[in-house]
Amino acid sequence: MFSGAKEITIALFGSHPYALLFVGMFFAGETVLLPAIYFALRGDLHLSYVIAIALAATVASDFVWYFIGSHMKNRFARRVVSGRLEKSLEKLDIAFTKRGALVLYLSKFVYGTRTAAQVLSGLHQMQLRKYVVVNFLGIFSLVSLISLIAYSIDATIERLTDIAHALEVAFLVFVCIVVLLHLVFGKYLKDIWSR
């Protein structure tokens, strides 16, 4: 029975990869974004859809954490977030008090702090409009940066492949010239030595 459910799941998500991307981004964040961009580079997905879905799923996920922080009492919110997230929450709390918007923005770029920053935004009652703008700018910056790096690497690899191909051809020409010179020079030396 388990293998049947597995096949249905694979078939469902195989025919709806963008739904899988949304669910993955909602729960796992950038961990799912990296392979999605890889598949976009291969041409299996459309990059514009990947970026739009990544933005939507991350905004939705972040807003859930903001809601938890803003509508729950401090003690309950801290109980909801436990383990590694709780430690991140404690460390960020001091910095967030001084520079909340900056911490929220930069939390997108520091692994393990994104969710804590969302909860802190709610706990500190950051104005919703400010939260939405800063959070969206952070998400957009991160997704753009990851996409830019991926495409730069892809373009570099293509150029390196072209260079490697050109080097192979150049080396082949070099080998042919060396062999030809070796034969000509060898024949010349044999003629001189045979006199």
Image (spheres, rainbow, N blue to C red):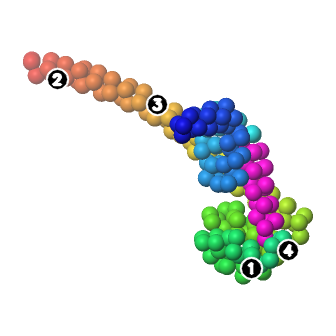
Left or right of 190 in this view: 141: right
- Residue of label 3: 165
Q: Are marks 3 and 2 in contact (CB under 8 Å)?
A: no
The mark total stands at 4
The residue lying at 75 percent from left, 40 percent from top is: 48
For marks 4 and 3, the one nearer the N-term is 4
- Residue position for label 2: 189
Camera-side residue of 192 and 118: 118
- Main SS of the magenta segment? helix
Element type where label 2 sits in the image: helix
For the question of whether residue 130 can be seen, the reply is yes
Q: Do the CB atoms of the residues marked 3 and 1 lie less than 8 Å apart?
A: no
Distance in Å between CA atoms under marks 1 and 2: 93 Å
Mark 4 / mark 1, whichever is N-terminal? 1
Are the residues at dot 4 and dot 3 in contact (C-beta closer than 8 Å)? no
Query: What residue lies at 56% left-to-right and 34% top-to-bottom?
Result: 4
Q: Are marks 1 and 2 in contact (CB under 8 Å)?
A: no
Residue 52 % position (x, y): 77, 44
Give the magenta part as a residue range: 50-69
Q: Secondary structure at mark 4?
A: loop
Residue tagged 1: 75
